[in-house]
Image (cartoon, coloured by chain):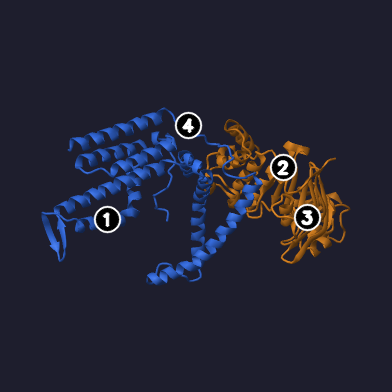
Chain colours: A orange, B blue
Amino acid sequence: MTQAITINNLTYQYDDHELFDGFNLSIEAGEWVALVGHNGSGKSTLAKLIVGLIVANGGDIDVFGKRLTVDSINDIRAQIGMVFQNPDNQFVGATVADDVAFGLENIELPSNEMPQRIDEALHTVGMENFKEREPHTLSGGQKQRVALASVLALGPKIIILDEATAMLDPEGRASIMKTLQNLKAQFGSELTLITITHDMDEAALADRIVVINDGRLIIDGNPDDVFSKSQTMHDNGLELPFAGELTARLTVKPKKYLDERELIHWLSPSNK
Amino acid sequence: MNNIMIGRFVPGSSWVHRLDPRTKMIVTFVFIFVMLFASSWATYALSAAFVILAIRLTQQPFKLYWDGLKPIFWLILFTVVLQLFLTPGTPVVFHVGPLQVTWPGILNAIYVMIRFTLIILMSTIMTLSTPPTSIANALESLLAPLNKIHVPVAELALMLSIALRFVPLLMDETQKIMNAQKSRGMSFSTGGPIKRARAIVPLLIPLFVGALQRALDLANAMEIRGFKDAASRTKYRVLLYGRQDVVAFIGTLIFVLIFIGIKISGV
C-alpha cells in the first residue's frame, strides 16, 4: 500500500507551548481516518501543518512520497483539498457555480471546460439544482456541500475536513456524512479522507480513528478498538457514542464493540 | 437597512438583464456625461424618454425605482434649495432678507432636480439588472488597458467582488450584534447625536474583530484552492458582446445624435 501522508518526528511550538514533540503518524492511500481530540488537542493544527498553512519547527511531512517544502508546497496542495469549519468564510464566489469555478480559475483551466467540471462536482454532492443560487439563500449544510464540491472539482487525492460539521444543525451534519459515504463509495481507494471532529458518531464512520491529546497520539485503531477503551477516552476529554457509553456501564459486556443497533439486539431478551 | 435600493441586484431575465455588463456600464457613463450638457426642456424631455424606455425594458415596477430615489431625497432637496436661493438673475420673484429667489433660480432648481433624478435612475437600472460580480468583471475588462501602466486591475476587481460578496454577511452580523446588545439594555435610537454616535462604538469593535477573522479564514480557503495571484487566472464567466448589445449601442448613439441635434438647433 502506498502512503498518502507520512509524518515523521514532527515538532511544533505554539505560544511558547510545545504542542507537537516528536509526533509520528502515517496514513495509507484510500483510508478514511478520523482525527479526534477535544478542543486545543492539536488536531486542527495538525491539518494546517499538513497543507503548509503553518510551518513546523522540525520533522518531516511527506505527501505521496514528496517532502513538504517551500518549493513543493504548490504541488502538494494540488493533491489535497480542505473544507473548513465556518461555511460562510470559505465561500468565495457570488453564486454556487462561481464558487466552484474559483479553484478552477486558479489552476487556469480553459473557460470552456469549466461548466462540465462544475456540473460533475455539484452532482457528486447533490447540489446540481442550486447552481445559480447565492450563498445567503443556502443552509449551512448546503454551503458545506458546495465547499466540498469546490474541492472535488480540483480532483484531489486527499480531502481533509477540519470540523466541517461543527457549525451545522443535525440535519446538515447528516447530509455531509451521507455525502462523504457516497464519495468513499464512488472513489474507493482513489480518495483518502481525513475528518477532524470531536463528534464520535461521525468518527464511527471512519475506517480508523486516531485520538490525539496535547499533541500526543493516544489511541490509534479501528472504531471498535477505540470505543472499547472508554476509560482512556474519558481521560482525554472525549465522549463515546451512546452505544459505547452504555456498554462501558454494563456489568456483563459484549465481547466486541457493538453499535447502537447491534447493542439493542444483543441486549434484547429474545436473544438470551 | 433592507430598503436601500442603490446597488441592489434584482434577478430577472429581461432584455436589459441579458445585456453584457460592459454595455450597461458604457451606456450609463455616456448618459451621465451627456446629461451634463442638458440645458433646455427639449433635451431634458429627450433624456427622460430614454430613461423611461430603459426602465420599461427592465420589466421591473416603477415603484422599485421610486424606492431607489427615496434615500437620496434629502441630497436632491439640498441642491435644489441651494440653486433656488443662490442663482442671481433679473426677474426677482420674492426675497427673504438678503436671500432672493429669481426666475432663473427656479428654473435652475427644477433642471437640477430632473438631472439628478435621471442620473440616479439610470445608475439604478444598471445595478438593479446586473449581478455585483458581473459589474466587477465588466470593470476589470473595461479597465484592462490600465494594466499597461501597472495598475493591478485584476486584483482590484477580485477585491471588489469579494467585498460585495461579504456585504450581506456583515449586514447580518451587524443586526445580530445590535440585537445582542439591545437585549442587554443598549439603545441605538434614543438620546442626542453624541449619545447615538457613542452607542456605535461597542457595535463596531466586535464587527471589526469578526470581519478580520473572516478575512483570515477566507485567505486560507483561497490559498488551499490554489490561489496564487489574481492576474494569472482563467475566467468562468466569459463576457461576450451579442446582437442585443449592438442594438443597445445603436439606440444610445441615436439618443446622443438627437441630443446634439437639439443643442445645435438651439431649441
Name which quarter of the figure residue A147 lies in.
Answer: top right
Graded by Cα atoms within 10 Å as few (under 14), some (14 to 19) or many (20 or more), the crowding at tag 4 reads: few
Residue A150 at x, y = what percent? 63, 42
From mark 4 to mark 2, how far is it between C-alphas? 34 Å
Mark 1 lies on residue: B79
* Same chain check for tags 4 and 2: no
A107 and A149: which one is in front? Answer: A107
From mark 1 to mark 2, how far is it between C-alphas? 59 Å
Q: Amino acid at mark 1?
A: Thr
Q: Amino acid at mark 2?
A: Asp
Task: Please give the label number shown on residue B196.
Answer: none
Sooner in the amino-acid sequence: mark 3 or mark 2:
2
Graded by Cα atoms within 10 Å as few (under 14), some (14 to 19) or many (20 or more), the crowding at tag 2 reads: few
Q: Secondary structure at mark 2?
A: helix
Mark 2 lies on residue: A75
Q: Secondary structure at mark 1?
A: helix
Q: Nearer the viewer, mark 3 or mark 1?
A: 1
Mark 4 lies on residue: B240
Any part of residue B179 in sight: no
Mark 3 lies on residue: A243
Sooner in the amino-acid sequence: mark 4 or mark 1:
1
Q: Nearer the viewer, mark 4 or mark 2?
A: 2
Callouts 3 and 2 close, C-beta under 8 Å = no
Graded by Cα atoms within 10 Å as few (under 14), some (14 to 19) or many (20 or more), the crowding at tag 1 reads: some
* Same chain check for tags 3 and 2: yes
A41 and B214: which one is in front? Answer: B214
Question: Which residue appears at 25% of the width and 47% of the height?
Answer: B114
From mark 3 to mark 1, how far is it between C-alphas? 73 Å
Q: Chain of mark 3?
A: A
From mark 4 to mark 3, how far is it between C-alphas? 59 Å
Which residue of the protein is positioned furthest toward the front in this rendering?
B149
Is B33 on the left or on the right of B136, as rendered? left
